[in-house]
Image: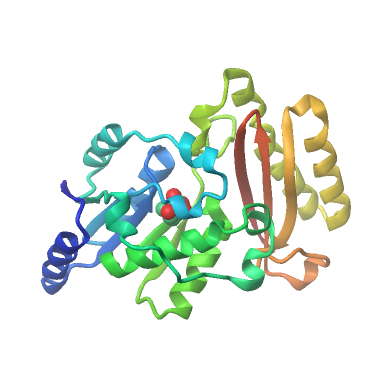
Amino acid sequence: MLVFDKKAELTEYLTQQRQTGKLIGFVPTMGALHQGHLSLIEASLSQTDLTVCSIFVNPTQFNNPQDLEKYPRTLEKDRELLEKAGCQVLFCPGQQEMYPNVSYTNFSFGLLETVMEGYFRPGHFHGVGLVVSKLFHIVQPNLAFFGQKDLQQCRIIEQLAKDLFFNVSVVVVPTMREADGLAMSSRNVRLQPGERKEAAILYKVLQESANRLLAGEGVQEIKKAAERTLTNTTTGVRLEYFCIADGGTLQPVKDVQQHKQLALCVAGYVGEVRLIDNLLLEL
Ligand code: PAF
């Protein structure tokens, strides 16, 4: 695996590769890689000729400084995992390489970010938009791979690519789960053993709610029941939101009949760790 930390060197290398007709796949990450990231690498390897993974813990997308500080950094282990997975190129720039000057550009994604993560983490998607735009300019991938766990991020990046004419197809890869259903996340390692068990309730409630929707129960009723379960103090969850939204626009749904795809989304703290998850339901 080739490793670059300078954008100019990576760009030069990728220009040569592109000239030989290679299709470039890109997996942007913040490191602390797990099986979920590796499934993105796998998807890229199977659909493109050259897979580039980036590892950069992007400060502008953390609205909580403690979260940034505590974000796990495991570069050596990540390198080994990527090498084993067959990734061909790793880009791991430093802070100065990605943010050589103060940025004045501001990203705002309208209705797509007034809900859920955008609402609870103000400024988060500005930071995501900024860094992903920079990375897309550097790598110029044909396909870019993102995990469905961050569904709102996926929708925002699809919109960003469309609005800014990035010549890239955004591929959304299904969430990888632990045996008890917990969505894989770099944050899971911060859960204490008891909390790790409690965290499985998030997926359980998503599944139960999806089944109730499919059985024809009303949206408000299901939402209330899910909120009741998740705010019950015995679950150990501090719920931020449970939403039943349109799968494309992510706006809350009133009448299921009007939608082709629904997204059931949840976010909450288990102990000190903020977790998110979602289920997509085709109607
Ligand atoms: O999903 C992530 O890990 C990050 O938000 C991303 C897309 C790498 C941007 O920093």
Left or right position of 129 against 43: right
Q: Is residue 129 above or below residue 194?
A: below
Q: Quadrant of residue 216?
A: bottom right
What residue do we see at 22% from left, 60% from top? 7
Residue at the spot x=67%, y=45% of the render? 267
Q: Is residue 239 left or right of residue 228?
A: left
State the scheme by which the image is colored. Answer: rainbow
Total number of numbered labels? 0
Q: In the depicted view, which residue is nearer to us: 229 or 138?
A: 138
User: Could you tell me residue 227's position as x and y percent?
Assistant: 81, 43
In the picture shown, does residue 271 fall above or below 12?
above
Seen at 88% across and 51% down, the residue is 221
Residue 274 visible in the displayed image: yes
Give the x, y percent position of residue 273. Answer: 59, 34
For this rendering, which residue is in front, 257 or 141?
141
Residue 195 occupies which quadrant of the picture? top right
Above or below, comparing residue 205 to residue 158 in the picture: above
Q: Residue at x 64, y 31 (%)?
A: 199
Q: Quadrant of the C terminus?
A: bottom right
Going by the picture, which residue comes out furthest to the top?
193
Residue 131 locus on image (x, y percent): 40, 61
The image quarter containing residue 44 is: bottom left
x%, y% of residue 106?
A: 50, 70
Q: Is residue 248 left or right of residue 190?
A: right
Is 169 situated above or below 264? below
Res. 147 visible in picture: no
